[in-house]
Amino acid sequence: MGFGQGPRMCIGSGPARLKAKVALNCLFGRVKRIERARKYTWTANPSLLGPTRLPMRGVAA
């Protein structure tokens, strides 16, 4: 997640990163592994490289 740096850094970056860390720790404590649920497609926009959707499935621990 990009929040910028320097004097114009996002004021909510600290709490947002903390929430993400807590959520990921909780998630990884409940699942043994995470895998793709089905095939994904890439974006057609050349300036935005990445999948349009990336469905995931967690396998219980």
Image (tube, rainbow, N blue to C red):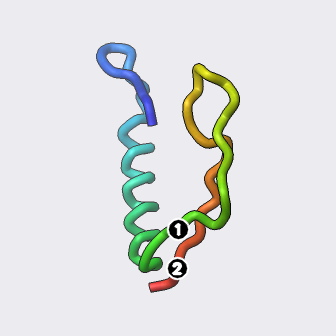
Q: Which mark is residue 35?
A: 1
Write the residue at 44% across / 74% down: 33
Decide which of tag 2 and tag 1 comes sooner along the chain.
Answer: 1
Determine crowd level at label 2: few under 14, some 14-19, many 20+ residues with C-alpha closer than 10 A.
few
Estimate the spatial distance between the alpha carbons at disc 2 and disc 1, rounded to whole Å.
Answer: 8 Å
Examine the image and state in which quarter residue 30 appears.
bottom left
User: Could you tell me residue 9's position as x and y percent?
Assistant: 37, 22
In the figure, residue 7 lies in which quadrant? top left
Residue closest to the eye, 42 or 53: 42
On screen, residue 53 versus residue 14, left or right, reads right
* Residue assigned mark 2: 59
Left or right relative to 20: residue 54: right
Name the amino acid, label 1.
Glu
Q: Position of residue 45 (x, y in %)?
A: 67, 25
Q: Residue at x 58, y 20 (%)?
A: 47
Secondary structure at numbered mark 2: strand
Residue closest to the far left: 6
Q: Quadrant of the N terminus?
A: top left
Residue sitting at x 44%, y 30%: 2
Q: Say whether marks 2 and 1 touch (CB < 8 Å).
A: yes
Of 45 and 33, nearer the camera is 45
Residue under the point 36% across and 39% down: 14
* Amino acid, disc 2: Val
Q: Is residue 29 above or below residue 19?
A: below
Q: Nearer the viewer, mark 2 or mark 1?
A: 1
Q: Please state the horizontal and vertical placement of residue 28, each as a whole percent of the image.
A: 41, 71
**Is 41 drawn above or below residue 31 in the view shown?**
above
Per the rendering, the mark at residue 15 is: none
x then y, percent, for residue 50: 56, 37
